Amino acid sequence: MASWREKLYDTKDLPKITEIPEKLQKKWGKGTMLIPSPLEVDEVMRKVPHGKLITTDIIRRVLAAKHGTIIACPLTIGIFIWIAANAAEEARREGEKNITPYWRTLKTGGFLNEKYPGGLEGHKKPLEKEGHEVAKKGEEVCGDGL
């Protein structure tokens, strides 16, 4: 079985631009869709600096704009975020220090990703260590509603 880093570097002949599938056209309309490579997704995740956060929908928009498409495939973006996170943890276990800060990538809506290494708690701990306040779903973080 391939390691997580081998999966990250397996381009699978990607990126590729295709027509938006019919089942997605109701939401996105007609036009083109990017199917990115795993490394492209990892590259965006790596650029998120300490103290900042990004969401999967922002990654989709960044990559779609880079390739001039209407959307980037939500399914493959999610899979490649998961691969990037596990590849980073694999690298950390092997002593690497400069890993992709995957914990700074949240799900759309700002939610923790239960598929990250260590589950929800594994996602929450490094965020709190960097100074982010993590609220339970449905709780306000700011008392003034902002």
Image (tube, rainbow, N blue to C red):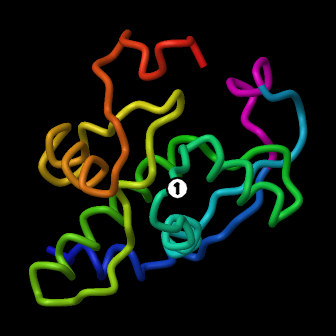
Above or below, comparing residue 26 to residue 28 in the picture:
above
Q: Nearer the viewer, residue 125 or 119?
A: 125
Q: Residue placed at 49% from the left, 72% from the top?
A: 46
Q: Quadrant of residue 57?
A: top right
Q: What x and y, as percent, mark residue 64?
A: 77, 55
Number of callouts: 1
Instruction: Determine the main secondary structure of the stretch shown in magenta.
Output: helix
Which residue position is annotated with label 1?
52
Residue bounds of the magenta highlight: 19-27
Q: Residue placed at 48% from the left, 20% from the top?
A: 142
Q: Which image quarter is the N terminus in? A: bottom left
The reply to whether the magenta stretch includes residue 129 is no
Q: Residue placed at 76% from the left, 49% from the top?
A: 33
Q: Which image quarter is the C terminus in? A: top right
Q: What x and y, as percent, mark residue 122?
A: 16, 48
Q: Is residue 132 left or right of residue 4?
A: right
- Callout 1 secondary element: loop
Q: Nearer the viewer, residue 21 or 48?
A: 48
Above or below, comparing residue 86 to residue 64 in the picture:
below
Q: Residue placed at 53% from the left, 27% from the top?
A: 109
Of the residues shown, which amino acid type is indicated by label 1? Answer: Lys
Above or below, comparing residue 9 to residue 47 in the picture:
below
- Disc 1: CA contacts within 10 A as few (<14), some (14-19) or many (>=20): few
Q: What x and y, as percent, mark residue 136?
A: 28, 19
Q: What x and y, as percent, mark residue 111?
A: 40, 31
